[in-house]
Amino acid sequence: MSIYKELNEVTIDLSEFDVSPLTNYEKKRVQKLVKKKLKLVKSHKGMGVAAATLAIGLLAMNHQTIANMPFIAALLEDWQVTEQVDWSPYKTVIGETRTTEMGDLTLNEVLVNYDKIMISATFDKNEETVFSYRHQLKPTVIINGEKVEAKGISAQSIAQNSSMYTIYNEITLAEPVAAANFDIQIMYDEMHTPQTKTLEGETLEQPWVFDIKASQLTVQNKTAVHDLHQTIQLQNDEQFVIDRIVTTPISTTIYYSGFSSDQSPNINLFDAEGNRYHWNSAYGNDDGTGEINYTGASFLESELFIQVFSTSTEDDAISGKVKILN
């Protein structure tokens, strides 16, 4: 019997579920799931109704029920972008598990993107281990025997059920990784808790250690570094310089200097059709230099315009729209 026929014949008592609003992350995952199912059954008569029934059932269930379903995968794309993209050609898929007294940690994917390393893992904690979405695991990364110098790291833990969490990390490096293929050691040896008061976090006595081989060749083949040194004039008579822009199939990153504020400039990207792209991470330094990253915005061999907006509202432009890449 078809799974779709089985789903249509199932009677579900929704009274046992908490009908609480889904987060944007959960809505996006459900939408991707439904789109995928619809594509799979498009050529079979009558299957559309079954897929729609599946969608209604999913939306009615509570967060934990959705998270426990095995066919919903937590990928790097899910974490970084809202649009539907596929980074499969650029990722190294691992699927290895290590066990410590805290539980099992499975390293899912590694993606090296110029000067950034993105990692996804799944943590299945032991019953005695105290862990929540407010706990973050942060790895030490060693490439070809040398510890990388990180100038920024982001981390997030997303609960899948009462004992399982998806662990995401993005590490911004001081210098891009030069090698196309390399040995990489990822050691989860640090944890931030709600009580952590320092940037370093708490050192784990039993870290999870993964020794793998990774490649960024497909990313490198489509990466372009544009040295610009282009001055951007603001309406308050101030100005700063776009030093360079790096475009990859994963992201676009702007490196700037001469910005007088203690905050990064709120730069939005625009393509030739006027579609707008907002930044998702930024690093500013006291000397007026910094960088802004737009994950999911890839401007390979395409026109790029930028415009600076007020830091208080994205509808208040403080510069004209400037063409940066032809």
Image (cartoon, helix red, strand yellow):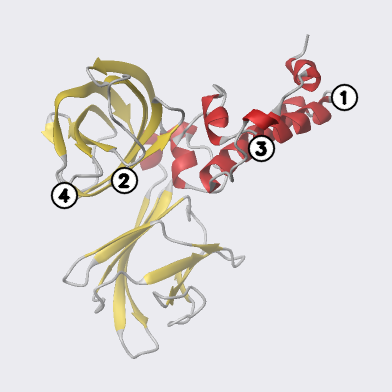
Rendered location of residue 122, percent (x, y): 38, 26
Image disc number at residue 45: 1
Image disc number at residue 197: 4
Instruction: Specify few, some or many for label 4: CA neighbours under 10 Å numbering under 14, 14-19, or 20 or more.
Output: few
Q: Tell me if label 4 and label 3 are in contact, CB under 8 Å.
A: no
Image disc number at residue 30: none
Rendered location of residue 56, percent (x, y): 73, 35
Q: Amino acid at mark 3?
A: Leu
Rendered location of residue 269, percent (x, y): 47, 65
Report the side of 52 relative to 139 (left or right): right
Marks 3 and 1, how far apart at CA: 24 Å
Rendered location of residue 297, percent (x, y): 48, 54
Q: Earlier in the sequence, mark 4 or mark 2?
A: 2
**Residue designated by label 3:** 59
Report the side of 81 relative to 254 (left or right): right
Q: Mark 3 or mark 1: which is in front?
A: 3
**Residue designated by label 2:** 114
Q: Amino acid at mark 1?
A: Lys
Q: Tell me if label 3 and label 1 are in contact, CB under 8 Å.
A: no
Q: Mark 1 or mark 4: which is in front?
A: 4
